[in-house]
Amino acid sequence: MNKVSKSYSGGNSGEKMGVEAVVVAPSRELGMQIEEALKKNKHAIVVGTPGRIAKLSAAGKLWTHGGRYLVLDEVDELLSFNFRVDMHRILQHVGRRSGPINLSRPSVGSTPDPTKPSQASVESLPLFLKHYYCVARLQHKVDTMRKCIHALDAKVVIAFMNNTKQLKDVVFKLEARGMKATELHGDLGKLARSSTLKKFKNDEVRVLVTNELSARGLDVAECDLVVNLDLPTDSSHYAHRACRTSQLGRDGIVLTICEESEVFIVKKMEK
């Protein structure tokens, strides 16, 4: 778990430790970004993923009963089935005197009903966002993406896949053809993830190949192209990927590379 605190020095309760707020993020990558943003903050804030916070709480190593604030970042993901048990524990153990729960999610729709987390819908996407798709055989998808990146003259690219095990292979193929790329996923250690994000944000690599969870909350305003190498599971997940580009009023492109048999799914998402 990432900890951001200048006054947090241990103790037997949230009040004694000075834990003022708990920030919950669905991925370690997003937690690291939040931690970085809060480093200069003088308040005692704990930042972590649901699993890590719940585990430390259950072990008695983290006492949040005295916390005044609870922040849920990417709330639609945190309310999903995968995090249900951990989130239940966190909601039970944050101090009773805490203020309102603060929620945040990408501006792609309204905050979902907590009792029906699977019904989150897409209401809007960035105004300057353009959507394209092209058809390619499975074995040609990576090379098709490489050619499209050159054709579009995209400088900062995030490519999404559903299977973490395939990320390394995509990076290898891009690097072999002279395009600098790197992978980002939950199996990387903290230092490796931090180094990867730093390289990408410093333009040392052109393409970041990742999965959806690892890219949650990824803030790279300069990203001008998002590529779906694998189709998202639904329109809401498409929107979450798409919102990684066209930030701050910039132009942005979402390119979906699909097989012939998948075209009908892409057209369905367009509606």
Image (tube, rainbow, N blue to C red):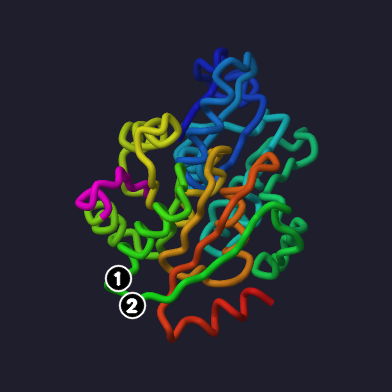
Residue 35: x percent and y percent? 53, 28
The vertical placement of 44 against 181, above or below, is: above
Q: Is residue 113 visible?
A: no
Rendered image quadrant of residue 34: top right
Labelled pair 2, 1 in contact (Cβ < 8 Å): yes
In the image as oriented, which residue stretches furthest toward the left? 176
* 183 part of magenta stretch: yes
Q: Which mark is residue 211?
A: none
Binning the other alpha carbons within 10 Å of mark 2 as few (below 14), some (14 to 19) or many (20 upward) gives few
Residue 230 shows up from this direction: yes
For the residues marked 2 and 1, what is the alpha-carbon distance in whole angstroms?
5 Å
- Residue nearer the viewer, 154 or 115: 154
Q: Quadrant of residue 238?
A: bottom right
Residue 157 falls left or right of residue 144: right
**Crowd tier of the residue under label 1, counting other residues whose Cα lies within 10 Å: few below 14, some 14–19, many 20 or above:** few
Residue marked by disc 1: 140
Q: Which residue is mark 2?
A: 137
Question: What residue is at 79 percent from the left and 39 percent from the top?
Answer: 100
Where does the image place residue 232, in percent across and percent down from the top left? 51, 68
* Image coords of residue 180 (percent x, y): 30, 43
The residue positioned 67% from the left and 65% from the top of the image is 117
Q: How many marks?
A: 2
Could you tell me which secondary element the residue under label 1 belongs to?
helix
Name the residue at 72% across, 65% down.
115
Which residues, given as a range, are shown in magenta?
Answer: 174-185
The three-letter amino acid code for the residue at tag 2 is Arg
